[in-house]
Amino acid sequence: VIQIYSESLIQNDTKLGTVIVYRDITKEHEVDQMKSEFVTTVSHELRTPLSSVLGFTELMLTRELKPERQKKYLTTIHQEAFRLTSLINDFLDVQKMESGSQEFDKKYHSILPIIQDVIDVQKVNSDKHVFVMDIQTEKLSVFGDRDKLSQVFMNLISNAIKYSPEGGKVLVRLYHTNKHLIINIKDEGLGIPQSAIGDLFTKFYRVDNSDRRKIGGTGLGLAIVKEIVKVHGGQISVESTLGQGSIFTVKFPVIEDVYVNASITMDKG
Ligand code: ADP
């Protein structure tokens, strides 16, 4: 996108010439476009769960319902409220990330119960996927902020579910090399086109194709994951085959000198 600006140079009523300035504003244009798409996405993402909460509470207030039906509606209301809360938390996190005011309370933890808790929450939200844990290492210690680490796996595992069909398997594998504790999150879902891989961890970026237009999201999840992993001295990468599935890989530095049992966490020093 080129912006053109021109001005005549006039001296003593004589036109000397014209100055024409061409400015490449492609980047600004893209940012503006992303922002306006973002506002549309956000209003949609906020409105959808709210209308379902309003609709179901209204039904419950105005009708006599059998207990099973009540439970079903309450479950939906709970899920939608959960969705709204995580959405708002994502906005706040991105805002904090950008202003540098995000605080990390780092301690030694075993990564195992952190991932296990995430899977337990996800199982409640989706009983239509199969979760498999494959643990091939005892070097499970990480030095980090429990809530933030939990968010990394919450975002990755919920994406694995969100972007794969019902009945799909989500495999979480843990192993180590000399330098890294490595966690793979593998799904059998839609996959990601190669052309999108480079932008995937950029905030607001969403892969846009007809399969996924109906799947809600803000494009913030992976940007948050990348930032948290970076602050923990780690790396994140992805391999994917369109139509077959994706593997997200998180690497943290191996901690040799601290033994952390699955149920124990201790302060540094
Ligand atoms: P959101 O899910 O809110 O759109 P994310 O930042 O979590 O945002 O992901 C960015 C995009 O990457 C998604 O819109 C989706 O198209 C793609 N994506 C992320 N995880 C997966 C996955 N496991 N399988 C397929 N596509 C994925």
Image (spheres, rainbow, N blue to C red):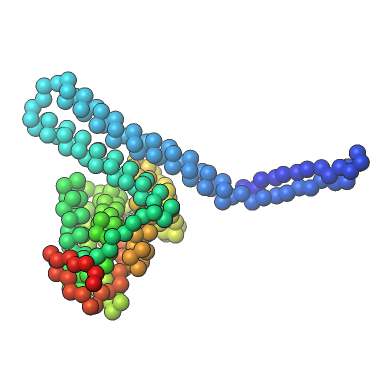
Q: Quadrant of residue 250?
A: bottom left
Report the residue that reaches farthest toward the top.
62
The image shows residue 162 at horizontal and vertical percentages of 28, 48
Report the residue that reaches farthest toward the front.
269
Residue at the spot 39% in from the left edge and 51% down from the top edge: 96
Residue at the spot 44% in from the left edge and 42% down from the top edge: 38
- Of 170 and 235, nearer the camera is 235
Location of the C terminus by quadrant is bottom left
Name the side, left or right, on which 51 lies relative to 68: right
Name the side, left or right, on which 142 lies relative to 24: left
- Decide: is 24 above or below 140: above
Residue at the spot 31% in from the left edge and 59% down from the top edge: 104
Does the rendering let one see residue 32?
A: yes
Does the rendering let one see residue 186?
A: no
- Of 165 and 236, nearer the camera is 236
Q: In which quarter of the image is residue 131?
A: bottom left
The image shows residue 160 at horizontal and vertical percentages of 27, 54
- Decide: is 248 above or below 43: below
